[in-house]
Image (spheres, rainbow, N blue to C red):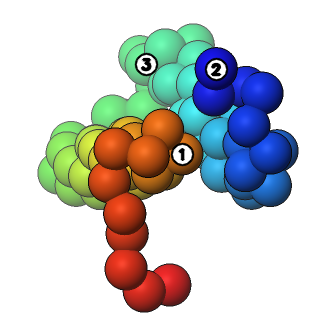
Amino acid sequence: AIFCRREFFSLDKSLLMGDPLCSLFLNLLTMLFAHKIPKVIGIITLIMLGTVIGVLQAALGVEIILRALTLLGVIVLQGG
């Protein structure tokens, strides 16, 4: 299993847990203050912020998938 491999424990835990937890926390804050946010920062800024956060979440997902496939030995990544 992946959890028994030694390489699994050398992963950066902040990447695996910190970023998704931060994203969940920001989503919670957004939901709690959804009625006030557009009045304060504007609709255009909100759309741009949503786009940036969406791209960051997609990049994080791709990175986690690539790391998992590397640990399973399905792919070999070259470089740093």
Looking at the rendered structure, the kind of residue marked 3 is Ala
* Picture coordinates of residue 8, whole percent (x, y): 72, 42
Callout 1: few (<14), some (14-19), or many (20+) C-alpha neighbours within 10 Å?
some
Front label number (1 vs 3): 1
Q: Is residue 66 left or right of residue 6?
A: left
* Image quadrant where one finds the N terminus: top right
Front label number (2 vs 3): 2
* Picture coordinates of residue 74, whole percent (x, y): 34, 44
Q: Is residue 55 left or right of residue 34?
A: left
How far apart are labels 1 and 2 at the CA level? Answer: 10 Å
Kindly state the secondary structure of the residue where label 3 is placed: loop
Residue assigned mark 2: 1
Q: Residue at x 42, y 86 (%)?
A: 79
* Picture coordinates of residue 15, whole percent (x, y): 65, 50
Of label 2 and label 3, which has the lower sequence position?
A: 2
Residue assigned mark 1: 71
Residue assigned mark 3: 34
How far apart are labels 1 and 3 at the CA level? Answer: 40 Å
Q: Residue at x 49, y 14 (%)?
A: 31
How far apart are labels 2 and 3 at the CA level? Answer: 42 Å
Q: Is residue 55 left or right of residue 63?
A: left
